[in-house]
Amino acid sequence: MVKNQTQTLVLAVPVYNEQDQIEAFLTQIRTVLSNIDMKWSVLFVDDGSHDATVDRILAFSADNPAIELIVLSRNFGKEAALTAALDHAEGDAVIPIDVDLQDPPELIPKMVEAWRGGADIVHARRHSRRQDTFFKRNSARIFYLLMHKIGDTRLPENVGDFRLIDRKVVLAIREIRERNRFMKGILSWPGFHTVSVNYDRPGRDTGQAKQGFRQLIKLALDGLVSFSVVPLRIWVIIGSMISFFAFVYMTWIILSVLIFGRSVPGYASLMTIILFMGGMQLLSVGILGEYLSQVFIEVKQRPIYLIDSHWGKEDD
Ligand code: UDP
Ligand code: MG
């Protein structure tokens, strides 16, 4: 496919209570994209902010036609906000990017170059996670290791949502309407020709990270459950192994009673086995519940997000 200068680039930016960050973000974007030779625009999705985020964006968009804003009816979470952005981003290339400048805009020209070179997806791969806490770094490592071992979709390591996506891939991603929005998985699921560019991930510009410990755990669980059925299946193997050993043990007990006669000892072994089996059963039922809850959410078919208002669309 020939990629030329009449093509458009859309930055898809979810925002939640980021009033102090809008200006710095737009300034930086303007500087970086001023000498890029393609038409570009920014599509903000306000994820139910309680502060002046919407007003700030509207103030900037008044004298800048390259800004579009979708306001969601409440806070749906970053994954849903990003989905809304991808559903409405009509560019030949789309780049999801965080407003806190942790995804460095300086990388965009490089990504566009790689895209023009024929890539359908250009990953921005973090070189280092120096700015992340010890906990976040290592939990991320364990998560990727686990996903790599048991996941169905190959997740690129140290790549966030920050990546350039060609229009045809955006169209493919729009087809994925599951309610459990594990975006890293969803963005990688379609495949296509993918390349990477590297960068160092900086700390947050202003404000606080809005995804705390609980959200990260939830994200990791959602990721595992929606892109792997191994936790569900593994119980077939564990169950059959335990049954096999139980059978061998039973045969041995019967034979020993027949040969050596009846004897009473065995309280300790009985207790351990009962406790162990009880624990295993609860764990497997818990995992079943985890998948069942996903099915439950999925069958309700609720919309992923609701739009309150849409500003700055070209055909308005
Ligand atoms: N965000 C959002 N909805 C939320 C939480 C966050 O749209 O409920 C946006 C936020 O404004 C920012 C991006 O998602 O642009 C990343 O958020 P954050 O920096 O808190 O996440 P982290 O960098 O820890 O992944
Ligand atoms: Mg951040």
Image (tube, rainbow, N blue to C red):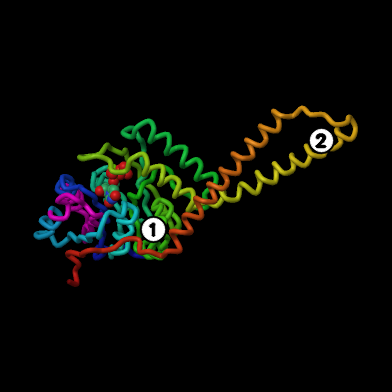
The residue that appears at 51% across and 51% down in the rendered structure is: 289
**Quarter of the figure that contains the N terminus:** bottom left
Element at label 1: loop
**Residue 113: x percent and y percent?**
31, 53
Circle 2 sits on which residue?
Answer: 253
The local secondary structure at tag 2 comes to helix
In this picture, is 300 found above or below 137?
below
Kindly check if marks 1 and 2 are in contact, taking CB atoms under 8 A apart as contact. no
> Closest to the observer: 231 or 92?
231
The residues bearing labels 1 and 2 have C-alpha atoms spaced at a distance of 64 Å
Residue 34 in the magenta stretch? The answer is yes
Which residue is nearer to you in this view: 292 or 303? 292
Of marks 1 and 2, the one in the foreground: 2
Q: What residue type is labelled 1?
A: Asp
Residue at 60 percent across and 41 percent down: it is 280
284 relative position to 67: left or right: right
The quarter of the picture where the C terminus appears is bottom left
Q: Which of 210 and 105 is in front in this view?
A: 210
Does residue 281 belong to the magenta stretch?
Answer: no
Spot occupied by residue 53 in the image (x, y as percentages of width and height): 17, 51
Q: Name the residue under label 1.
A: 120
Residue 31, visible in the rendered structure: no
Q: Is residue 51 visible?
A: yes
Residue at 24% of width from left, 50% of height from top? 16
Query: Which of the pair 178/99 is nearer the observer?
Result: 178
Marked residue nearer the N-terminal end (1 or 2): 1
**Label 2 neighbour load within 10 Å: few <14, some 14-19, many 20+:** few
Q: In which quarter of the image is residue 193?
A: bottom left
The region drawn magenta spans 26-55
